Amino acid sequence: MAAVAPIDRVLAALEAATGFPARRAGDAWSARCPAHEDRSPSLSVRQGDDDKVVLHCFAGCSVNDVLAAARLEMTDLFPPRPERPSPNGKPVYYDYTDEKGDVLFRVVRGPDKKFWQQRRVGDSWVNGLAPGTRRPLYRLPEVLKAVNDGQTIFVVEGEKDVEAVRAAGGVATCNPMGAGKWQRGHADSLRGASRVVVVADKDEPGRAHARTVAESLSGRVDQVVIAEAKVGKDAADHLGAGLRLEDLEVTAGESEAPARRLIVQDGNEVRRRKVSYLWKPWLPRRKLVMVDGDPEVGKSTLCLDLAARITRGREMPDGSAGAGPAHVVLLCGEDDADDTIAPRLDAAGADDRFIHFVHATEDPSGECPVTIPQDVDLLEEAVGRYGAVLVVVDVLSEYLDGRVDTNSQGVRRPLAALRTMARRTDSAVLCLRHLRKEATDKAIYAGGGSIGIIAAARAGWLVGFHPEDSSVRVLAAGKMNLANGKPPSLMFSTRPWPEDPDIGYVEWGAAVDLTANQLVQPAAPVPTGEQQEENEEKRRLVDRVKEAIETFLPVGRDNAILSNELREQVLAATRCSPRTYDSAHTRVTFGQAWRVDLPDGTRGMKVWRPEPPPAVETQDRRP
């Protein structure tokens, strides 16, 4: 059957929510808004050129409020993407269900061994998962029954292995998307199991994945062991060779494995890879990046501009190709999402289907603030769930555990948790900081807190005002560990958004020959007209005092006088301040002074002015 068009789906949902059908009005529809008490139709429903549905409530209701009242998702406004073709024959489908067996999504395995996920929209399957889609264990109802029955459960790496174990008479499961995607919720589904055998693929990623699974099950199940295939790479190869499940080779178990051990990898087992970027060389993936700048310099707006570009797959500020369209996770502790961050993203042209705000954590006792490093595992779960490529932490100090001393090297430990998350999720983590109050001439020392913070990052940006034009900002590279040299600095300005002048967006300019170090140099204050006149009066006074010193200062060593006597004479004659006398004193040429004993037992200094050199007669060489 053909998929339901977005406009038809939305109109039907609005009619069901309000009890009134929409009416056609030219190239749009007029409907009652379900988000407020609407006696006369105030909701405009229009279909865009790309078949996207555009909603606008003239009473002021937001799109999210309208969708929630109509029991719709943001994805319902968009047409489904066409299914990815299978190049070599018929694909295999693996359904992931909830506890009751209702299908949540499915994984597709193409004949070319490529995998992707699909969700149901109407009567059709489309590629990709909607934001917030739950990702349970494969064959979840069977797994829960096996836990209750006390059966051994095999945790393998992929759906093909699960089906091989089931064909051999066992109970098996796996997490979606393979190695490195195990989540804490998956371990909770196995809580109370009598025995779990984690079957590792015989390569380093597979063994690392098995260790992660086994460690997460510690304390949740009675016994957990790690095993490997006796023949081949995985469980399917092992069973395909005619061996039994009992023939799997146990490599570690609760009794054999030490509680804590050192993980060592041989150099020949390290899989070489090139550094990948969201924006080369500014924003490397799998790394931690710091963005430093004073408040109100525009660093938050700049990062939202980059996030918007990634959600659309647009080019980056320097004209280079962008990444995406891809998902972005935002932790914005200083501003509210509804009245500040989301409007700024709208002004930047973001696709808000790919934006995900992290507000808090929740447990049976209620909501709690997100804390680093304690909640990094939950953050990693969310980043993995959405497949996000960028995480923005604005600002870092807002989320660090209050017990972390940001001015000590101990701050590197919570940052290490963020770095590990970035590596596991293949994302870039962008952390914002304010500048320290003390002036410095090196950008690498400018950010607040310990030098260990910027040391933990692989790239560091500095955002500052242009020294010659405060209406222009500059993005400069303060640190680039992974690049051969630093990229040119880029100018940008913040402009008022036409739809709401209180909201700013970034307008990028050309490259500029300014370094990060130059941006942190304290600007010399420009004197006002009154200050300039004052300074000129002081210079004239110092000149008069200098002339007085030279007048009272005798010429020749034999005529030397005490410096205190000279000072008293000049102060009396000019009525200047001692400070002015000292300033003028430094501009006078004295002869070689010497100390003498005074009648009162103290010592003084004799000063004098050398005689001027004799004039040199010159011979007139004119003919």
Image: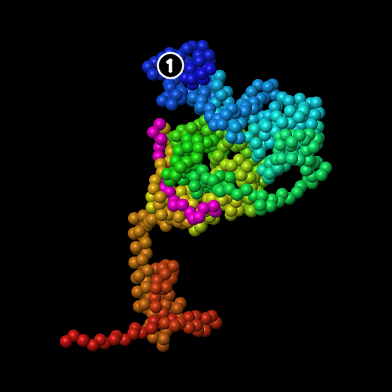
Under mark 1, the amino acid is Ser
- Residue 166 vertical position relative to residue 324 in the rendered view, above or below: above
Query: Where in the figure is residue 55, as x and y percent of width and height?
Result: 46, 23
Residue at (39% x, 75% y) in the render: 588
Nearer the observer, 436 or 90: 90
- Residue 57 vertical position relative to residue 366 in the rendered view, above or below: above
Q: In which quarter of the image is residue 397?
A: top right
Query: In which quadrant is the C terminus drawn?
Result: bottom left
- Position of residue 112 in the picture relative to residue 238 (left or right): left
Q: In the rendered image, which residue does mark 1 sit on?
A: 30
Q: How many labels does the image show?
A: 1
Q: Is residue 24 above or below residue 359?
A: above
Indicate the secondary structure of the residue bearing disc 1: strand
Q: Which residue is drawn at 37% across and 17% down?
A: 26
Residue 94 place in picture, x, y as percent: 64, 27
Report x, y in % for residue 75. 52, 26
405 to the left or right of 474: right
- Quick one: which residue is furthest to the left in this view? 623
Q: Residue at x 60, y 53 (%)?
A: 452
Question: The magenta stretch spans which residues?
Answer: 481-499
Residue that appears at 64% across and 50% down = 270
Q: Is residue 211 magenta?
A: no
The answer to whether residue 13 shows anywhere in this view is: yes
Q: Position of residue 38 (x, y in %)?
A: 48, 15
Image side of residue 507 versus residue 112, left or right: left
- Is 492 magenta? The answer is yes
In the image, residue 232 sits, relative to residue 33, either above or below, namely: below
For the view shown, which residue lies furthest in the right direction? 255
